[in-house]
Image (cartoon, coloured by chain):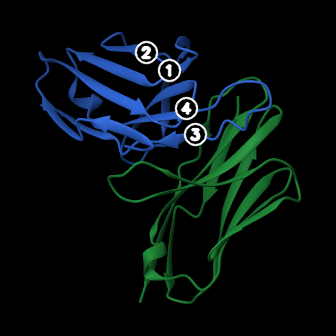
């Protein structure tokens, strides 16, 4: 059974204070690892897909990296508008079902 | 409209009511999904439809009944729900097939409250 664990559950940062969110996973043959952003009361917004260890993707202040056991979402000089819950999910080679982690709730204070 | 749309956005229903949630995707995808999101719990996959055929039913109670008439539309029919079914119900869609990345795109959700 695929499993995804995200840490920390909640993270409070000052504006401009860089940090990283962790996503640890076990999967029977990784097809892809996905990062999403979710604002309260809204659906998750797709951010990145990572396919293999060593891969990196960037978007504005966000950078996602992947190893064989975990992924990190690095946030550089965050702004209050980066406050949201960040979700990590994996898909294995057997099908097209996402397994989600519990998310990290990020709060950035001005 | 673009992306994935869901109606209604909010729904309050009694335990004896029957209602339906609607989802429509405008992305040319061929797979659609229903998820349940409850407070303090990870997103739970409920149903998967690939090419209009249901391929997964993740042990969902029979009071939830999905329908996928074509690859662009997905419904979730609700009847005799319980208060613990109150949650945010999310629809998603993706490509499905050889060589596809399976990135799922989500709608805004329907906030369901069962009284």
Is the N terminus of chain B in the top left, top right, bottom left or bottom right quadrant? top left
Instruction: Please tell me which residue is depicted at 84% across the width and 56% down the height of the picture.
Output: A67
Q: Tell me the subunit letter for badge 2.
A: B
Instruction: Please tell me which residue is depicted at 49% across the width and 27% down the height of the picture.
Output: B33
- State how far apart marks 3 and 1 are (Cα): 14 Å
Q: Do the residues labelled 4 and 1 touch (CB within 8 Å)?
A: no
Instruction: Report the mark closest to the observer, 2 or 4.
Output: 4
Return the disc, 2 or 4, that comes first in the chain's sequence.
4
- Chain with colour blue in the figure: B
Q: Answer yes or no: are tags 4 and 3 on the same subunit.
A: yes
Secondary structure of residue under mark 3: loop
Q: Tell me the subunit letter for badge 1.
A: B
- State how far apart marks 3 and 2 are (Cα): 17 Å
**Residue A85: x %, y % from top left:** 47, 60
Return the disc, 4 or 3, that comes first in the chain's sequence.
4
- State how far apart marks 4 and 3 are (Cα): 12 Å
Front-most of residues B83 and B10:
B10
Is disc 1 surrounded by few (<14), some (14 to 19) or many (20+) residues within 10 Å?
many
- Chain with colour green in the figure: A
**Residue A35: x %, y % from top left:** 62, 54
Q: Which mark is residue B71?
A: 1
Q: Name the residue under label 2.
A: B68
Q: Tell me the subunit letter for badge 3.
A: B
**Residue B44: x %, y % from top left:** 48, 33
Return the disc, 4 or 1, that comes first in the chain's sequence.
4
Q: Is residue B69 above or below residue A11?
A: above
Instruction: Report the mark closest to the observer, 1 or 2.
Output: 1
Secondary structure of residue under mark 1: loop
Q: Mark 3 points at which residue?
A: B104
Q: Do the residues labelled 2 and 4 touch (CB within 8 Å)?
A: no
- State how far apart marks 4 and 1 are (Cα): 8 Å
């Amino acid at each position: 059974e695929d499993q995804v664990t995200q840490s920390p559950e909640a993270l409070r940062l000052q504006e401009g204070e860089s940090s990283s969110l962790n996503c640890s996973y076990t999967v029977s043959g990784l097809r892809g690892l996905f990062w999403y952003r979710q604002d309260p009361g809204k659906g998750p917004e797709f951010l990145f897909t990572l396919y293999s260890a060593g891969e990196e993707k960037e978007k504005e202040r966000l950078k996602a990296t992947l190893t064989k056991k975990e992924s990190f979402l690095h946030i550089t000089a965050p702004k209050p508008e980066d406050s949201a819950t960040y979700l990590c999910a994996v898909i294995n080679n057997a099908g097209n079902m996402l397994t989600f982690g519990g998310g990290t709730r990020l709060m950035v204070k001005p | 409209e673009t992306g994935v749309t869901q109606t209604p956005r909010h729904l309050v229903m009694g335990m004896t009511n029957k209602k339906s949630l609607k989802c429509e995707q405008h992305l040319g995808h061929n797979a659609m999904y229903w998820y349940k999101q409850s407070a303090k719990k990870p997103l739970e996959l409920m149903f998967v439809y690939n090419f209009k055929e249901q391929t997964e039913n993740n042990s969902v109670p029979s009071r939830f009944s999905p329908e996928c008439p074509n690859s662009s539309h997905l419904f979730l029919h609700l009847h005799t729900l319980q208060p613990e079914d109150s949650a945010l119900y999310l629809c998603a869609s993706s490509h499905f097939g050889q060589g596809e990345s399976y990135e799922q795109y989500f709608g805004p959700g329907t906030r369901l409250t069962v009284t």
